[in-house]
Image: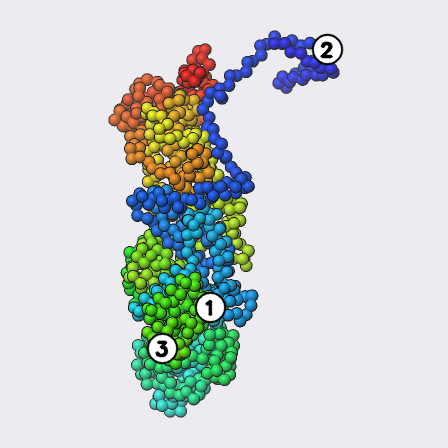
């Protein structure tokens, strides 16, 4: 080769030889330089002859592309998937899986709790569809209640019921529209196109509710009575137990008050004797009607230090030490009394001095755990107190109205004052001389779950469900209910039973405008309930005609009740008044099973947060037991609540709220779904953090990369008639197919146990190990450099693998699967239209045992080989013929002969293997190095003299040419 340097200036070339000599060669411009050394020829490139994976399925998407792709998948695939499964799977003969939706509240924007709940439900439904089972799921909304009404009344005061209802309905509908759109964007499987949803203000829903109310009334399970109930002065309505929260740091007065015992009660001269009681609600003292004691306790009369020594105080002896510790007053015992002797005592009222000789009553709720063993009893303000009044037949006095202020019947110094704001201080000021000791107590106190303000207990005429008749059959029914997750099943069932047993009664009436009216009339004179089946049916017909229940507030009794019905009721319109109460929203949602599923159908699953032990789980159970004597569900799934990375509940005031919209915009909808599946089933506190969400996105990216690689290998889906049969005898192919059978079975088992976090982990592990580290890694030589039959067998094997991965992933990440599938199935069929199943004959124990035996040898080789290229290794394996050697011979037939193109060589990734017999039980491995160049095309087989490529590669390339 001749080379010329067209230089125009003098230059120097410096060459450094070691560190001893520096030679400088100078060339003058114009000299020609000639080289006599032959130039090296370019190496031959074989890239075009290698079968590399090819696909247009992108490795990643920009945020804009991802948003567009999600929109297309929603419109083209997910939107029609629910209707498709209804039509296709109805013919398969499997029973329909019914997941009854607990209705979210139609109020405000969706938060992470909504995302956890709805996505867990969707994964549950999709996995059933993926396994060939039809599902029934109708999303619902709870549309009534105080929060919506407060929004409606916030713009103006003193609105009519009709105005409030009109604004409330508009507000709820707007919230439903917004929430429904976002639920749909998460890929939730439902018939959104036909708007197949339920709302608790729909006419037919209310018709069902009115009929159920009357049926329970006829059974004697619904009744009206005067009882003390939780009452919210801030909301001006009664509340059920499920509508309470508890303020753990509430401050109440802690007061020891003395009640003067009538002189005739004790035969002790010249002494004033007092009953000593302890209370944290001094505002209830005006309503005091008795003192309760426990006949089985021992009582004492004591003198108090720093008090008039002519005064004696009565208390339980077991609580005297507590009293001394709390008050720093020393007690001197004067006399011991047995509890039974207190029945003859009487006392004078501490505020209304005209009330003398009030009674002492024996009661089991009086204990020696706290207080004094004597309990101030105001039947209007305590459930136990009220039960005492029923037993003793004393009339209940209530001096507190619905606003939580004292009525005109109260003592004059209290009238019009708020019991919570001024009541305690005013009462304590009035009875100052009878206050033995006063301090403050920090304790847990019930508050209104909506307004977050304290509630009181107040007696009022309300409607109730008789839970005492329902508790026992409800508890029996619960024993047959499966509860998930399994790890918490016993604790969850115990919690539900405990809450059920604790419930004293269920108040179902509320004093508001936005809700379903309790459909009763009352006698104007006596207040007696006027109700029959004809009235209910008439109201239901009116409801169907008018399209809403608003007429209850608009029409007069004369307009509401036709003449023939009045004759049947034996009343005149002027003698009747309409009820003004509405039904508790837990009555609304507790009856959804009847309105949505039908009176005879039982849901396979209810899936909600653990707070529903006192809410929807319980109200639905009680309503179903009352109506048809069975539970409304066969199983419950209980999930936790979202917290930030520090364990704090998410709230705007803490500034730690992460909304689902933020997540889907930054990471994509599937990343949100992957996070829910990974963290939403195993913990009661579900951590939401950027770190975990980023981790979810990264893991999903790896899954996407695997699907992309598989798609690149297998190409487009082939129809059955285009599939070419292969004479495939590869143990690796048989091994992967056998592993797929086990994979499908295990994934289905985990899905059916609702262990979605384990599904995620299992799928990731399968991809990382059986697919990537084992199969794909070991067949690369055959895939890239093998002949057409070998490549075809690999493609068909990986097609089954790809389909199984799509099946396992589709319930969790449907957007990714549908996108990937669109590049695989060029007929534009969606994944939800596929039936993917392994074949029983794929299970191959022989192949699995042989491959695992080879893996054992590979581990031994890796321990000895060091850093040498393993394709340069010659391996000799000696062992007993009846042991592992037999399994290895399935992969490498020749015995006693070095062989380089067996499947065992492929698995061990070595240049050659020699199998030979020995008498040792354990395999013996010997390694040596092959002194040969590797084929430049496959870099596996050695080259012979004058060979450019190995014989295998030469044959493959010749066949293609």
Q: Which mark is residue 571?
A: 3
Report helix, strand or loop for mark 1: loop
Identify the residue shown where x is 41% and y is 75%. Answer: 577
Q: Which residue carries the number 2 mark? A: 30
Please identify, in this view, whether the residue under mark 2 or under mark 3 is nearer the observer.
3
Determine contact: label 2, label 3, CB under 8 Å. no
Q: Position of residue 843 (x, y in %)?
A: 30, 34
Which circle marks residue 551 in the picture? none
Say whether marks 1 and 3 touch (CB < 8 Å): no
Q: Secondary structure at mark 2?
A: loop
Quadrant containing the C terminus is top left
What residue is pinned by disc 1? 513
How many other residues sit within 10 Å of disc 3, few (<14), some (14-19) or many (≥20)? some
Label 3 SS: loop
- Asked if residue 92 can be seen in this view, the reply is yes
Camera-side residue of 605 and 262: 605
Q: How many numbered marks have been drawn onto this rendered protein structure?
A: 3
Near-viewer residue (540 or 564): 564
Q: Is residue 369 above or below residue 396?
A: above
């Amino acid at each position: 080769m001749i080379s010329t340097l067209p230089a125009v200036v003098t230059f120097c070339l410096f060459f450094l030889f070691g560190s001893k000599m520096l030679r400088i060669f100078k060339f003058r411009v114009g000299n020609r330089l000639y080289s006599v050394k032959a130039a090296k020829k370019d190496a031959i490139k074989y890239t075009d002859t290698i079968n590399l994976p090819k696909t247009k399925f992108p490795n990643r998407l920009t945020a804009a592309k991802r948003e567009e792709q999600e929109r297309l998948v929603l419109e083209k695939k997910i939107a029609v998937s629910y209707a498709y499964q209804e039509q296709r799977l109805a013919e398969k003969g499997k029973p329909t899986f019914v997941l009854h939706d607990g209705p979210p509240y139609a109020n405000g924007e969706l938060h992470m709790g909504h995302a956890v709940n709805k996505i867990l439900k969707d994964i549950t439904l999709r996995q059933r569809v993926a396994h060939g089972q039809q599902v029934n799921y109708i999303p619902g909304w709870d549309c009534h209640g105080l929060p919506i009404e407060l929004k409606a009344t916030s713009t103006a005061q003193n609105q009519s019921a009709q105005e409030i209802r009109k604004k409330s309905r508009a507000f709820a509908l707007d919230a439903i529209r917004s929430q429904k759109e976002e639920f749909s964007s998460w890929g939730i499987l439902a018939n959104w196109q036909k708007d197949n949803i339920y709302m608790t203000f729909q006419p037919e829903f209310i018709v069902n509710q009115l009929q159920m109310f009357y049926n329970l009334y006829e059974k004697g399970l619904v009744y009206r009575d005067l009882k003390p109930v939780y009452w919210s002065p801030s909301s001006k309505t009664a509340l059920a137990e499920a509508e309470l929260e508890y303020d753990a740091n509430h401050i109440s007065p802690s007061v020891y008050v003395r009640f003067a015992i009538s002189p005739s009660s004790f035969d002790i001269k010249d002494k004033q004797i007092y009953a000593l009681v302890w209370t944290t609600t001094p505002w209830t003292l005006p309503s005091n009607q008795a003192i309760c004691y426990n006949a089985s306790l021992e009582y004492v009369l004591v003198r108090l230090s720093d008090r008039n020594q002519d005064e004696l105080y009565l208390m339980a002896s077991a609580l005297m030490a507590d009293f001394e510790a709390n008050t720093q007053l020393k007690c001197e015992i004067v006399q011991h009394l047995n509890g039974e002797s207190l029945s003859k005592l009487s006392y004078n009222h501490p505020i209304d001095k005209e009330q003398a000789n009030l009674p002492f009553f024996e009661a089991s709720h009086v204990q020696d755990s706290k207080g004094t063993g004597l309990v101030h009893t105001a039947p209007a303000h305590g459930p136990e107190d009220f039960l005492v009044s029923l037993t003793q037949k004393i009339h209940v006095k209530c001096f507190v109205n619905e606003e939580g202020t004292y009525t005109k019947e109260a003592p004059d110094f209290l009238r019009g004052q708020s019991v919570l704001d001024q009541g305690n201080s005013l009462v304590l000021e009035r009875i100052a001389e009878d206050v033995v000791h006063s301090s403050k107590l920090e304790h847990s106190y019930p508050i209104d779950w909506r307004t977050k303000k304290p509630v009181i207990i107040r007696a009022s005429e309300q409607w109730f469900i008789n839970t005492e008749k329902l508790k026992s059959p409800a508890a029996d029914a619960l024993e047959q209910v499966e509860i998930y997750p399994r790890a918490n099943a016993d604790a969850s069932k115990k919690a539900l039973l405990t809450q059920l047993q604790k419930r004293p009664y269920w108040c179902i009436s509320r004093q508001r405008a936005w809700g379903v009216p309790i459909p009763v009339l009352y006698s104007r004179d006596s207040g007696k309930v006027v109700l029959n089946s004809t009235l209910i049916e008439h109201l239901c017909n009116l409801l169907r005609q008018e399209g809403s229940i608003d007429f209850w507030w608009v029409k007069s009794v004369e307009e509401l009740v036709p003449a023939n019905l009045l004759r049947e009721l034996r009343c005149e319109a002027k003698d009747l008044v309409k009820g003004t109460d509405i039904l508790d929203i837990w009555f609304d949602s507790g009856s959804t099973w009847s309105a949505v599923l039908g009176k005879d159908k039982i849901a396979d699953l209810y899936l909600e947060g653990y707070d529903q032990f006192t809410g929807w789980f319980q109200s639905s159970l009680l309503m179903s037991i009352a109506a048809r004597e069975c539970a409304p569900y066969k199983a419950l799934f209980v999930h936790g609540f979202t917290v930030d990375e520090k364990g704090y509940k998410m709230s705007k005031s803490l500034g730690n709220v992460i909304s689902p919209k933020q997540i889907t915009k930054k990471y994509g909808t599937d990343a949100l779904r992957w996070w829910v599946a990974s963290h939403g089933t195993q913990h009661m506190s579900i951590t939401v953090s950027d770190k975990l969400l980023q981790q979810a996105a990264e893991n999903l990216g790896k899954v996407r990369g695997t699907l992309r690689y598989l798609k690149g290998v297998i190409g487009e889906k082939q129809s059955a008639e285009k599939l070419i049969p292969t004479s495939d005898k590869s143990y690796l192919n048989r091994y992967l197919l056998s592993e797929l059978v086990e994979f499908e079975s295990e994934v289905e088992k985990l899905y059916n146990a609702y262990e979605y976090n384990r599904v995620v982990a299992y799928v990731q592990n399968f991809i990382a190990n059986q697919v990537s580290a084992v199969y794909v890694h070991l067949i690369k030589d055959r895939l890239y450099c093998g002949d057409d039959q070998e490549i075809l067998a690999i493609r068909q094997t990986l097609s089954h693998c790809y389909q199984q991965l799509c099946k396992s992933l589709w319930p969790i990440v449907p957007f990714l699967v549908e996108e990937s599938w669109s590049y695989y199935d060029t007929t534009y069929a969606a994944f939800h239209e596929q039936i993917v199943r392994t074949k029983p004959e794929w299970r191959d124990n022989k192949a699995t045992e042989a491959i695992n035996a080879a893996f054992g040898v590979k581990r031994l080789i890796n321990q000895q080989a060091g850093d040498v290229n393993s394709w340069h290794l010659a391996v000799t394996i000696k062992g007993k013929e009846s042991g592992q050697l037999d399994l290895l011979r399935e992969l490498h037939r020749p015995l006693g002969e070095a062989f380089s193109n067996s499947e065992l060589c492929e698995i061990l990734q070595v240049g050659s293997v020699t199998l030979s017999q020995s008498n040792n039980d354990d395999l013996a491995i010997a390694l040596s190095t092959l002194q040969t160049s590797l084929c430049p095309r496959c870099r596996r087989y050695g080259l012979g003299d004058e060979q450019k490529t190995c014989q295998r590669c030469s044959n493959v390339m010749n066949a293609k040419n």
